[in-house]
Amino acid sequence: MEEHWHSTLDELRQKLSAESFVTWLEPLRFDSFDGKRVRVRIPNRFYADWIRTHYLELILDALRSRSSEGELEIDWEVDTSLEAHTDQPGGSSGRERSSSAPPAASAPPSRPSGPPSATNLNPKYRFENFVVGPSNQLAHAAAIAAASSPGTRYNPLFIYGGVGLGKTHLVNAVGHRILQDQPQARILYVSAERFTNEFIWALQNHRINEFRDRYRNQCDALLMDDIQFLASREQTQEEFFHTFNALYHSDKQIVVSSDVYPQQIGKMEERLVSRFQWGMVADVQAPELDTRVAIVKKKAEQEGIAMSNEVANFLAQTVKTNVRELEGTLLRLAVKAELMKRPIDIEFAKEALRTQLPKQDAAISVDDVQRAVCEYFNIKLADLKSHRRHRSLAHPRMIAMYLCRQRLHTSYTELGERFGGKDHTTVISAVRKIESRIDSEDAELRQSIDAIEHKLARR
Ligand code: ADP
Ligand code: MG
């Protein structure tokens, strides 16, 4: 029966919206079966009622179609350990976490690590596996500070930034760190969408006191993800406002994430916006190349995926949009390698990611790079290829050599020839020089290179 239960949930995962599934079904835990009644554990009483009215028929239909047991019924049992702060590793806590298959194969690409469970903190999102770089340093430091002395200086902590840049990861990490120091702390991690759903449901079902008690009194730290969802939802904003005040005035830590800066959340009440700024506001930006490389390496290590630095670099260079995308690409690559029984080397990676590479890439030539560099620095092609050593020419020349080497893998000897007949050692030292300046975080250089690459991509 337990198997039927899991495959039923898998079926519903496909049928329902991700948010509904994550909110209402994912937290459920199969407990036992006595031949007629399936016992399922739920985090609190809200679930039983909500599921009865919304999902029970679906669940029963799917279960019945799988089992030969005839009439089935479900008993709900409240198990508060499923609430907010338990991680429930292994045990009966769900297939994904107790699976013992090799990591690369056990994680289907579409949901690499399983979405954060609704009531639990996501066990994978900890400070220990968050890679820090210039793009997220501030938010990371603020999150650590808030977690180390909750309810004090960094209260509330407001983290904002684009999709897939680590907000949810940081918000969860705060929860884990608080628990590490204070195991009894009651941590509530909730998406604003879920908060809204629960609130509406509580209103409709005359359970608002219970709802308020949970959020205002039974909570030592409230971690509210994706607050932008409250835009235009006046009544929920009002409720959240009072929740906020109650917690704030009893020195409970509040962490809020949003995909935009507080003032930019459309139709958000001014008094809430201003409260968000009482504590600390920190942003996460898209990570730079080095950070992306470090993230790929860390993730590969975590998932037991063997790959060279070269491949890690290649991935990080290819996928620039956001970290989620980067992770997804890595996992897809691993699954593909496993299926095709091939090692993840650079050839395989290039082959596998061909569709993802900027299309023009293949067509770019040494000439293109030279032209783009000349355009950017506003110099003549003849000067770029000349032997003149003035910085205004030598600098673009080195960048052009570096880009050719990096993007086209042209040999040093050939590059020497293409740059007006220079010795290959000259090319090598130019490429090294640029590499070391990139390593030392030369912001101006990075900007030039980004701009030139941008030109190349639009060719
Ligand atoms: P957001 O909430 O901002 O949309 P997430 O926190 O869900 O983004 O991050 C997307 C994925 O990328 C997650 O799997 C997360 O662990 C990972 N991730 C993001 N930033 C980092 C980082 N700096 N180090 C390690 N993993 C990261
Ligand atoms: Mg998120």
Image (cartoon, grey):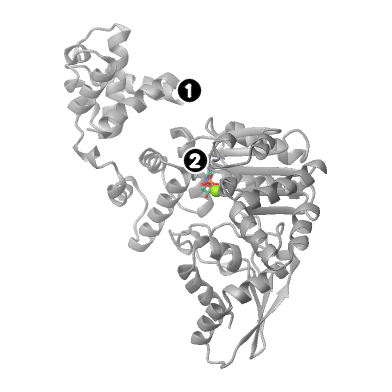
Mark 2 sits on what residue?
162
Residue 176, can we see it?
no
Q: Measure the alpha-carbon separation of dots 1 and 2.
A: 26 Å
**Of 69 and 61, the residue lying toward us:** 61
Disc 1 marks which amino acid?
Ser
Q: Is residue 92 left or right of residue 250?
A: left
Q: Quadrant of residue 258?
A: top right
Locate residue 200, reporting x and y percent. 64, 61
Residue at image position (18%, 16%) is 381
Q: Is mark 2 within 8 Å of ligand 1?
A: yes
Neighbourhood count class around disc 2 (C-alpha, 10 Å): few under 14, some 14–19, many 20 upward:
some
Locate residue 256, reporting x and y percent. 64, 43
Q: Quadrant of residue 255?
A: top right
Locate residue 95, reporting x and y percent. 57, 69
**Of 371 and 17, the residue lying toward us:** 17
Which residue reaches farthest right? 250
Q: Can you say which quadrant of the picture contains the N terminus?
A: bottom right
How many marks on residues? 2
**Which of labels 1 and 2 is toward the front?**
2
Q: Can you say which quadrant of the picture contains the C terminus?
A: top left
Residue at image position (72%, 76%) is 77
Picture disc at residue 440: 1
**Of 296 and 262, the residue lying toward us:** 262
Residue 192, can we see it?
yes
Earlier in the chain: of badge 1 and badge 2, it is 2
Disc 2 marks which amino acid?
Gly
